[in-house]
Amino acid sequence: MLITYSLSDISDYIDWLYFFHAWGFPPKYAEIATIHGCDACRHAWVSRFPTDERQRAQEAINLFSDAQRELSRMSRHVSIRCLVELYSACSKDEDILLFLDGESTPIVLPMLRQQRPGQDGYCLCLSDFLPEESDGERGKLGLFATSVTNSTPPISSSESVRPAIGSITNQDAYHSMLVQTLSDRLAEAGAERLHQEVRTKIWGYCKDEKLAIGDLLHCRYQGIRPAVGYPCLPDISLNFLLDSVLDLSRIGIDLTEHGMMIPHASVSGLMFSAPEARYFAIGSVSDDQLSDYARRRGMAPTEIRKYIKC
């Protein structure tokens, strides 16, 4: 299923915490995104900081103002293209078995398992959140991707912006970084909006869900959507498997030889519906697990190591 969002469709879903993180701001400065835009409210917000932090707070205000202006400009040229499909699936140990429509032979998606137990004492694997093949049951698994199409023309002299961060003095470099960091957030915001629609409509396992945007950004929904390259799905080469199933080119995504997505402002991953599903970090991968995982991926351990981001 292909879905296209306009910037106005997903702007409320932007997680400004990670936008400011990309610019080196501690989380407390991202609060500016929730402050009323009038001068009095912003001045009061800055005044709440210790004297030696107020310049940094003002930089956060300037950056957020520039971001809002750039989003307004981008809205005329940018769209967020999304791709999602649901498949019958089950698990076999640390493997996910994915069944395409009409196919009896599954596509195998190998997963990694935590090497150190979490607070609950378990070493989790994403395959744990699907029915086991040995039980003769199948569940569902979502595969998704989002990508930002940006045909924004170069900034003109009449639209010139002053770099909001003191350490960046080159206007073109500042604008390029502003567009890239906003585009990254828009790809993630598209995934957030898409996941909401999957839960409430497309898959419909939470039809009555009524969560505020803040609840969504804090993952207070049922199910998870781990993205490739994230802590519980750290193998970038899984993009090749997702591409073989979804055909990522349908939303303009190409893969490099290292499995990275082009354009950079893209997100891909899996969707699980189980109430017990939660995010976790794989952590350091032991040599024994790496050898087993490489065997299941059909690759040499030295080759697969290059793709694992942990």
Image: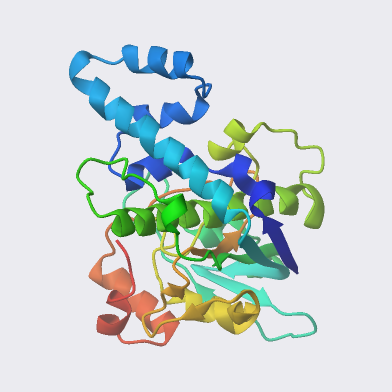
Q: Is residue 296 visible?
A: yes
Residue 3: x %, y % from top left: 73, 64
The image shows a total of numbered marks equal to 0
Residue 172: x %, y % from top left: 32, 59
Residue 60: x %, y % from top left: 35, 33
Image quarter hosting the N terminus: bottom right
- Residue at (53% x, 80% y) in the render: 241
- Residue at (58% x, 62% y) in the render: 270
Residue 291, above or below 138: below
- Which of 80/158 is in front? 158
Residue 51, above or below 16: above
- Residue at (49% x, 75% y) in the render: 239
- Residue at (19% x, 45% y) in the render: 167
Dividing the picture into quadrants, the one containing residue 234 is bottom left
Residue 102: x %, y % from top left: 80, 84
- Which of 278/76 is in front? 76
Image quarter hosting the C terminus: bottom left
Q: How is the image coloured?
A: rainbow
- Which of 231/77 is in front? 77
Task: Report the residue that reaches farthest toward the front.
Answer: 158
Q: Is residue 274 visible?
A: no
Left or right of residue 201: residue 75: left
Dividing the picture into quadrants, the one containing residue 257 is bottom left
Residue 15, above or below 310: above
Residue 29, above or below 244: above
Left or right of residue 274: residue 69: left
- Which of 206/120 is in front? 206
